[in-house]
Amino acid sequence: MRKNSNDRSHIEPSSGERLSRFAISPALTARSLEFFVTVAREGSMSAAAERLRLTQPAISQAIGALEASLGVQLFDRSVRPPALTLQAGALLPHAIAILESLQKFDNALRLGHLAQLPALRIGMLNSVATTIGPVIINSLREMAAEVSVDSGFFATRFQSLSQREFDFIITADEASPPPDVQIMPILTEPLLIIVPASYEGDPRDIQRVSETLDHIRFGRDPNMVSRVDIALQARGMAPQRRFHLDTNEGVLQMVAAGAGWTVLPVLAVIKAMERGEPIRVAPYPEDSLVRSIFLAMRRGDGMHVGEHIHDVAITGLRESILPKVKKLVPEVAARFRLDTLREGAV
């Protein structure tokens, strides 16, 4: 007689259902598995007891209870020292894997404390990566086994956090952060007018600069490009847009070559000025045109790491970058403002 395919009484339970019905004996614990693995590795009960700082009778009793619980003989006691049975040899790799997984689980539980993370993914503005980036990355050696940094456009958008592509971003994203994203302000910096060293006029006369030179736009950040365009239009200016590049370095090299002028934030220009690139700079005439940089993370996820990154970034800016700003562009140093209070995070 053919069985009805709809009769579920004959269907084998899934592996998940079988596991859910599996009753673990009180003798089968992480501690008893640790005893089993240690005895197998050390080669004897006495050596395992020494390793675990216990007495040999305590180890022998625990192994006996585990064997009774499993209904399996783990060690052949007819030989000295006791040897693993064939079935115990088959169980040993799984016992080791369970203990390793429990250790990783415990590390994950301690994420907010001292546990080292296996990997940390950070999206970082290119101008930050090329200035204080090495200081930040080097400071994370003890916090993460592996640190990866991406300076691409998407890597510094809030969306990359929400989609869990990155764990933290150092960004100038001007969009409103999603509800699940928390931010910590780092820096507010002014913008600079940059002209070639060969330009004979006053770079502070932005109207004449615009009429004389082609405008080279930095196009990776559409929000900043739009703000600069609006600010120029408000002054009655419509610069000729001959060139459009997506890296700060590319824009600066074009300016240095005499191809035109541009507007960039201080942090994007300071390294080129320090190297003595053939450029001249002047403050953008409106104080309101600034760029704000902040650290962003998923709310409540790895706060201690975020606070560390924030504090290291502030220290790096104060000790390494601010002195250069005061030396190379002293007229904007007062507007190069560090946000030192993490408590202001929103």
Image (cartoon, helix red, strand yellow):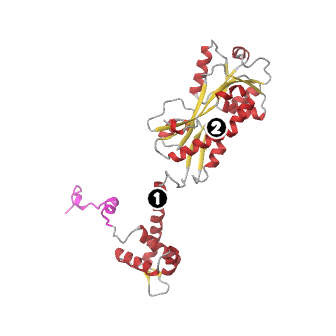
Residue 99 drawn at (x, y percent): 46, 65
Q: Residues within 10 Å of mark 2 (few under 14, many from 20)?
A: some
Above or below: residue 91 compared with residue 80: above
Which residues are the magenta region? Answer: 1-23
- The amino acid type found where label 1 is placed reads Asp
Q: Are marks 2 and 1 in contact (CB under 8 Å)?
A: no
Residue 142, quarter of picture: bottom right
Give 323 or 309, whichever is nearer the viewer. Answer: 323
Q: Nearer the viewer, residue 243 or 10?
A: 243
Q: Residue visible at 45% across and 55% down?
A: 109
Q: On the image, numbered disc 1 is attached to which residue?
A: 106
| Foreground pick, 102 / 330 | 330
- Horizontal side, residue 90 vs residue 27: left or right: right
Give the image location of residue 306, x and y in percent: 54, 44
Cα–Cα span, label 2 and label 1: 34 Å
Residue 128 — which label? 2
Which SS class for mark 2?
helix
